[in-house]
Amino acid sequence: MKSNVQKISPRIISGEKRGQKIKIPPKTRPVTDRVKKTIFDIIGSSIRNAKVLDIFAGSGNLGLECLSRGALFVTFVEKNYLSSQTIQENLNKLKINKDQYEIINKDMVSFSRLYREKYDFIFIDPPFKFAKEVNLELIRKFLKTTTIIVIKIPIGDEFEGGIENFEIIIKKIIGINLILFLHSKTI
């Protein structure tokens, strides 16, 4: 039986790579242009020269948008091998320099155990079925005092742990998505 769901074909909405479409892996639900526009309207030009962590990267949609808008470096974390390959294909298509990114083919827990870099922005966009498993304490070691965390989850979901140590700066609801902009209360 064929699905009546239309596959969304995301595009880069601003910056140097504006208008270019990106490939999405099978069985994924990418961030829509509407949600992405809302996120980046809030972040504004502060993404320029930023170091970014994109967890549950999927197609790389959010990290690619950051690179198009002048981010210095993006670490894409995606445990699904086919999705990691799609990220690489998108980076190649957009002609992003290899010194501007790395792709880590691991889950959030494994990544948090092995890496210690600090980031200006952290994007967390888990598949809806895994949203409740996000534990914000896992990202604490990646924070600078000014780090902003952007999380997209389904409305009504809560996290496994760690939210009490973060301040919600902005909360937006777009369709079925809850978008939280967080800052750590303590580092």
Image (cartoon, helix red, strand yellow):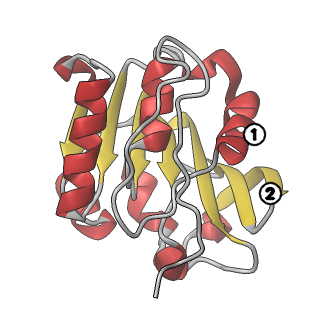
| Dot label at residue 174 | 2
Write the residue at 27% across / 66% down.
Answer: 107
Answer with left or right where residue 174 lies relative to residue 16.
Answer: right
Residue 172 location, x and y as percent? 82, 54
Looking at the image, is mark 2 or mark 1 earlier in the sequence?
Answer: 1
Residue 178: give x, y in percent of width and height: 73, 63
* Residue 120 shown left or right of residue 85 in the figure: right
SS class of the residue under badge 1? helix
Q: Distance between the residues labelled 2 and 1?
A: 9 Å
Q: Are marks 2 and 1 in contact (CB under 8 Å)?
A: yes
Residue designated by label 1: 38
Mark 1 closeness class: few <14, some 14–19, many ≥20 residues within 10 Å: some
In the image, what residue occupies the spot 60% across and 56% down?
A: 151
Residue 41, by quadrant, is top right
Q: Is residue 143 visible?
A: no
**Farthest top residue in view:** 16
Image quarter of residue 88: top left
Q: Nearer the viewer, residue 112 or 6?
A: 6
Instruction: Tell me residue 10's x, y (percent).
Output: 53, 42
Name the kind of residue labelled 1 in the image.
Thr
61 vs 146: above or below: below
Question: Does residue 155 show up?
Answer: yes
Residue 53: which numbered mark, if any? none
